[in-house]
Image: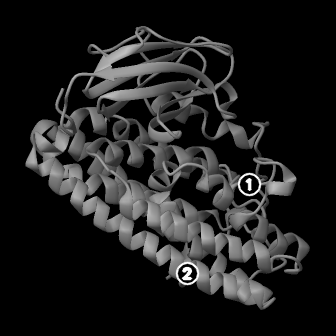
Amino acid sequence: MHAPPPETTTRARHLPGRRVIGVGVAALPLALLAACGSSSSSGSASGGIAVEANDTTCAPATSTGVAGTSKFTIKNAGNKVTELYVYAPGDRVVGEVEQVGPGISRDLTVELQPGSYELACKPGGSGDGIRAPFTVTGAAAPAAGADPRLATAVAQYRSFVIAQSGELVTRTQEFAAAVQAGDVERAKTLYPTTREPWERVEPVAESLGDLDPKIDAREGDVPAAEWGGFHRIEKALWVDKNLDGMAPVAQALVTDVSAVKSGIEKADLTASNLGNGANELLTEVATGKVTGEEERYSHTDLWDFTANVDGAKQAYLPLRPVLLDRNPALAQQLDTQFAAVESALASFERGNGWELYNALTPEQTKALADRVDALAEPLSRLTAAVLPA
């Protein structure tokens, strides 16, 4: 377990967090916007369903599909960075692709059973998105049924996320007890390590509905009166420097992460969840961790960063036997790039913890961005490579 280094008054630099992309720090992930997926000019690829998107519309080429493996190719013809989500009833996230820059096309491969879905394009990345109905017909079993190795991969990953969700509850209970006791220093020590299991399983947690914003919203993500969770307590610890009024917030956090654990234990995972989840975690690193945006008050971003990379690797490894058979060159590339990211992170280990992020130089943050860039592109091709066409 990594504990944060003692806070000092001699931090070298502050890399400001942001929700609205600004000058300087925003330059780091720009290469990633193009690198994380296809940049082809075609509206569809390899028989995929084209989704034409701009700042006001979301238009799939067809409103129906056949059960089984489906690939959507979103082309952003607008001026804003956009996202594509596939929602099952109840806004359960089946799959998502983020950071689709203007003029960029990206693919999203998912497994869909017969039923009614919605596609949602999110220019600017906020709100419910521009929705389009999508109906799946026919009959199909999960892809795991066609390849026993995929069934094994899903089972292995299920065990991992269930264990991590249990660890999340245990650590959050300990953290909440320190908050409720008003023990600022102990709560600061526990804060980053409490978040590690959450960061490893966040893609699965995000699929459970509205729990993610309750647990992980940053200031400005939700109305001020609704803001709670980890980052509300983070601000109290590092900015307010007291825990007045935080006991109910801590108790609600315990309740919400317990609901995540229950939801994960019941979640219907598929092989596409593994590949897409790994890709989502690298996008999370690119857009929230490399920029210093996520932990804007504590600067404990490297705990999150490392947990995201570990979560992505734990989703990739169960699929690796299938990938070695179907695309050994991609497996070798992923092995190499995971090792490179892990090596880059290792240089910032400090005792039982990590360097505070605002102590890194711009050159060091740029180097981390480059390493993530090199991993994100091949990882975006994992799902399509392992699922049967």
Q: Which residue position holds label 1? A: 218
Q: Which residue is mark 2?
A: 171
| Label 2 Cα neighbours within 10 Å, binned few <14 / some 14-19 / many ≥20 | many
* Element carrying mark 2: helix
Type of amino acid at the residue the image marks with label 2: Arg
Q: Splitting the image into 4 quarters, where does residue 226 fall?
A: bottom right
Q: Which mark is residue 376?
A: none
Q: Position of residue 183 (x, y in %)?
A: 78, 90
User: Does residue 320 appear anywhere in the picture?
Assistant: yes
Residue for point 90% across, 73% down:
240
Query: Quick check: 157 above or below 25?
Result: below
Is 68 drawn above or below residue 261 in the view shown?
above
Q: Quadrant of residue 172?
A: bottom right
Q: Amino acid at mark 1?
A: Arg
- Reading the chain from its start, which is encountered first: label 2 or label 1? 2
* SS class, disc 1: loop
Which residue is rendered at x = 27% and y = 32% of the image? 384
Percent position (x, y) of residue 217? 70, 54
User: CA–CA distance between discs 2 and 1?
Assistant: 20 Å
The location of residue 54, given as percent across then percent down, is: 62, 13
One can see residue 347 in this view: no
Badge 1 local density, few (<14 within 10 Å), some, or many (20+)? many
Q: Is residue 96 above or below residue 120?
A: below
Closer to us: 34 or 49: 49
Q: Please count the marks in the image.
A: 2
Decide which of 317, 175 is in the foreground and name it.
Answer: 175
Name the quadrant of the C terminus.
top left
Point 54% across, 52% down: residue: 368
